[in-house]
């Protein structure tokens, strides 16, 4: 009996230990246990990330490849691709000159459009790029100056570091320091949409996929925000979704994944996810 | 024959005792490890936050004074100043106290002194349930009810404002204040009440002249705990604050307290930007430490 008790205690301690060690090693195990299969590490933009996740989910269903996606922002992803930390980097902005110079190749996997949105009651429906800049830098502070009602403008922007904000600022040509200080900072497209939909003073910018009847979209230089206009390069508030990799670093598995994305099936998934297919 | 049997018995008893003591020791160790776990976690968190947060000032030559008193926060242009956020955090907390403390205190007095047992049995669980609501739901409530209410009723240009933050935080700190203050008031000896009433003082007079002063240290503890809750709150605040980078000059300005700055940008930050968010954490942590210090002072005073 006594020895049985001892055994029980021993087993109990053992099981506690196993659980503890299992907990601490869990993550490592899952990544290493699939060592037989090829692993493609991808990191970068939080805008491209969700699309890449969807593509990866579909791809891994029929292929044994293990795809790891880290959403850490475009710049960090590009840096990782250059340094070799990740095989592929995701970017929602064009590469800078020095990044191209360090031997990066880029593949456009889809496009994304950014649209300036206001409250549905707002009469302003068309702005020039210059006016958009004036709004976001605080030079124009009342909708009446733009042909709307006599209402103060409330600017809603994304947080510093957001890929959408980087791209928007780059295209409209103002810097983070120039952004009007009392702008509301909302985290995420959905949050911007909610804020704008509930405030008749507000103006913000969101991805095409978030457009619906709760908000009113603004034409830029008379061009409507549609996927066709982006593809025909008429609508300028758009950006490419890029996969970047260093020459020679791309594995066979990585190449196959990119081929899958560019295939008809991959592009269909991209369209379903709300991005604009490249063809 | 009999002697070996006794020997055998003593040996067995001795063995059983040994096992008992072993078990005792093992469980003691086990409990000690569990107790140490929280201490170790605390040290790890402090160590990690300070290591990460101090790095830019120690190794990269950023000035801590500029960090605290700088009014520009533009990470992409290498400007890190959190003065507007410190002011926002302090204003929001003080504002929440001004609204939350009287309501909480009066609720506690009502529950402990005035309400009938039946009524108290309804209100008390409701207050405690309020404490159990996830903070993000307070934020959603604030965004869906308080923000539009401020916009429509007071004609504010934007409802995401300091006053919205204050209102949400005031509601959130209520359960803490009510529960702790109520316990303190109930702990006041019955003889105090009887003595006061016997001298002909009214019930309200007794409450404010005798009971509240007697429960003072407990009530102060309640206020400081509520304050801690308010200053550390993040998820509810992030939705209603507006997160603008300005030093608030009126209740209708949108603000960015320290906590929301960290939560808002940590997802995208790397390098110095990320370290500066940890440094923001250090400042926040210092506030909490000071609060705890004050709390310890108050309770030791109460002990005397």
Image (spheres, coloured by chain):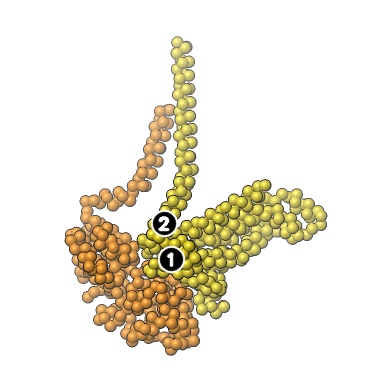
Chain colours: A orange, B yellow
Task: Please tell me which residue lies in front, A26 or B162.
Answer: B162
Residue annotated with mark 1: B80
Q: Residue furthest top?
A: B1
Q: State left or right for residue B106 relative to residue A128.
A: right
| Residue B115 position by quadrant | bottom right
* Mark count: 2
| Chain ID of residue with mark 2 | B
Residue drawn 28% across and 63% down?
Answer: A79
Q: State left or right for residue B196 relative to residue A253.
A: right
Residue annotated with mark 2: B58
Residue drawn 79% across and 58% down?
Answer: B201
Could you tell me residue A67's position as x and y percent? 26, 59
Q: State left or right for residue B98 relative to residue B86.
A: right
Q: Secondary structure at mark 2?
A: helix
- Which badge, 2 or 1, comes first in the chain's sequence? 2
| Residue B100 position by quadrant | bottom right
Is the Cβ of the residue at disc 2 closer than 8 Å to that at disc 1? no
Indicate whether B145 appears above or below B118. below
Indicate whether A185 appears above or below B287. below
Distance Cα–Cα, label 2 vs label 1: 15 Å
Residue drawn 28% across and 52% down?
Answer: A31
């Amino acid at each position: 009996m006594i020895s049985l008790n001892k055994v029980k205690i021993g087993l109990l301690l053992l099981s506690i230990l196993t659980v503890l060690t299992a907990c601490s090693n869990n993550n490592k195990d899952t990544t290493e246990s699939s060592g037989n299969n090829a692993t493609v590490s991808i990191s970068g933009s939080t805008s491209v990330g969700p699309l890449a996740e969807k593509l990866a989910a579909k791809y891994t269903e029929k292929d044994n490849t293990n795809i790891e996606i880290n959403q850490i922002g475009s710049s960090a992803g590009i840096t990782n691709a250059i340094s070799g930390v990740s095989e592929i980097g995701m970017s929602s902005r064009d590469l800078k000159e020095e990044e191209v110079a360090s031997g990066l190749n880029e593949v456009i996997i889809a496009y994304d459009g950014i649209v300036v949105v206001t409250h549905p009651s707002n009469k302003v429906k068309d702005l020039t790029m210059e006016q958009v800049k004036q709004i976001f830098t605080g030079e124009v502070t009342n909708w009446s100056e733009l042909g709307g009602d006599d209402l103060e403008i409330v600017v809603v922007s994304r947080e510093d570091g957001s890929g959408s904000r980087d791209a928007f600022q780059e295209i409209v040509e103002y810097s983070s320091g120039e952004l009007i200080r009392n702008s509301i900072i909302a985290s995420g497209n959905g949050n911007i949409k909610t804020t704008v939909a509930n405030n008749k003073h507000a103006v913000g910018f969101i991805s095409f996929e978030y457009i619906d009847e709760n908000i009113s979209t603004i034409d830029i230089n008379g061009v409507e925000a549609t996927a066709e206009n982006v593809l025909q390069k008429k609508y300028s508030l758009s950006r490419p979704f890029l996969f970047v990799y260093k020459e020679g670093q791309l594995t066979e598995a990585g190449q196959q994944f990119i081929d899958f994305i560019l295939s008809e099936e991959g592009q269909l998934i991209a369209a379903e996810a709300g991005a604009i297919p490249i063809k | 024959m009999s002697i070996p049997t006794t020997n055998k018995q003593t040996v067995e008893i001795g063995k059983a005792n040994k096992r008992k003591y072993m078990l005792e020791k093992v469980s003691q160790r086990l409990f000690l490890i569990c107790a140490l776990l929280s201490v170790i976690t605390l040290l790890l968190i402090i160590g990690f936050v300070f290591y990460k947060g101090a790095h830019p000032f120690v190794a990269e030559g950023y000035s801590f004074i500029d960090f605290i008193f700088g009014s520009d926060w533009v990470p992409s242009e290498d400007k890190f100043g959190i003065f507007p956020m410190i002011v926002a955090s302090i204003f929001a907390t003080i504002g929440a106290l001004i609204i939350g403390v009287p309501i909480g205190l009066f609720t506690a007095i009502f529950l402990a002194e005035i309400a009938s047992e039946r009524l108290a049995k309804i209100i008390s669980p409701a207050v405690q349930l309020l404490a159990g609501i996830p903070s993000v739901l307070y934020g959603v409530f604030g965004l869906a009810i308080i923000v539009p209410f401020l916009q429509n009723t007071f004609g504010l240009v934007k409802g995401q404002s300091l006053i919205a933050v204050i209102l949400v935080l005031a509601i959130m700190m209520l359960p803490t204040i009510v529960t702790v203050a109520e316990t303190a008031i109930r702990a006041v000896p019955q003889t105090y009440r009887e003595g006061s009433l016997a001298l002909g003082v009214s019930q309200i007079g007794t409450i404010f002249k005798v009971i509240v002063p007697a429960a003072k240290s407990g009530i102060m503890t309640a206020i400081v705990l509520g304050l801690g809750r308010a200053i550390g709150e993040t998820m509810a605040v992030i939705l209603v604050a507006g997160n603008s980078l300005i030093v608030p000059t009126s209740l209708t300005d949108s603000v960015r307290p320290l906590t929301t700055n960290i939560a808002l940008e940590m997802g995208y930050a790397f390098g110095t930007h990320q370290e500066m968010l940890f440094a923001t954490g250090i400042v926040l942590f210092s506030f909490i430490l000071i609060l705890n210090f004050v709390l310890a002072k108050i309770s030791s005073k109460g002990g005397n």
